[in-house]
Image: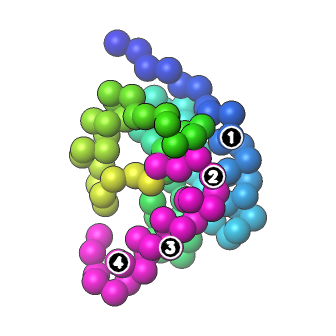
Amino acid sequence: MTYRKRTDANQAGIVDALRKAGFTVYDKSKCGWGIPDIIVCRGRHCEWVEIKTGPREGLTDAEGEFYDICPGGPPILAWTPDLVIAEFDRRAAGRAVGGGV
């Protein structure tokens, strides 16, 4: 079985905006097999991010399988840099207060 290894049209813009906002971004979009598109880090906190073109685009079967087993919890699902930043900050604050992974 093979999986597509293309990037969404908005990925480059999201990656650029995240880097400008002070995040380190690791592109994993060529991995395939349901692995999320990017990993974003700020300080010692990192999150997997699956980039979609909009709110109606769902996960592939392989992405859904990865979500179910993802270390550290489910990846962030987003289609704009603002969504990534807001969810990243929410999760980072929750981990700082409650410990967590």
Q: Earlier in the sequence, mark 1 or mark 3?
A: 1
Q: Alpha-carbon neighbours of circle 2 within 10 Å: few (<14), some, or many (≥20)?
A: some
Q: Nearer the viewer, residue 46 or 52?
A: 52
- Disc 4 marks which residue? 95
Question: Is residue 8 found inside the magenta-colored segment of the image?
Answer: no
2 or 1: tag closer to the N-terminus = 1
Verify CB contact (< 8 Å) between mark 1 and mark 4. Answer: no
Would you identify the image quadrant in which residue 40 lies?
bottom right
Circle 1 crowding by C-alpha within 10 Å: few under 14, some 14–19, many from 20 = some
Q: Residue furthest front?
A: 56
* Mark-to-mark CA distance, 3 and 4: 10 Å
Of the numbered discs 2 and 3, the one sitting upstream in the chain is 2
Which residue range is magenta in the image? 77-101
> What amino acid is at disc 1?
Asn
73 lies left or right of 51: left
Q: Which residue is mark 1?
A: 10
Residue 99 vertical placement versus 52 (above, below): below
- Place of residue 80 in the rendered image (x, y in percent of width and height, measured from the top left): 63, 52
Residue 32 location (% of width, % of height): 45, 29
Residue type for callout 3: Asp
Are the residues tagged 1 and 3 within 8 Å (C-beta)?
no
Label 2 element class: loop
The amino acid beneath tag 4 is Arg
Instruction: Identify the mark at residue 89; answer none if there is no mark.
Output: 3
> Residue 42 at x, y = what percent?
56, 71
Work out whether mark 4 precedes mark 2 in sequence or the reverse, and give the earlier one: 2
The residue at the point 28 percent across, 81 percent down is 99
The reply to whether discs 2 and 1 touch (Cβ–Cβ < 8 Å) is yes
Q: Which residue is mark 2?
A: 80
Q: Is residue 4 visible?
A: yes
- In the rendering, at what x and y percent does residue 61 appear? 32, 27
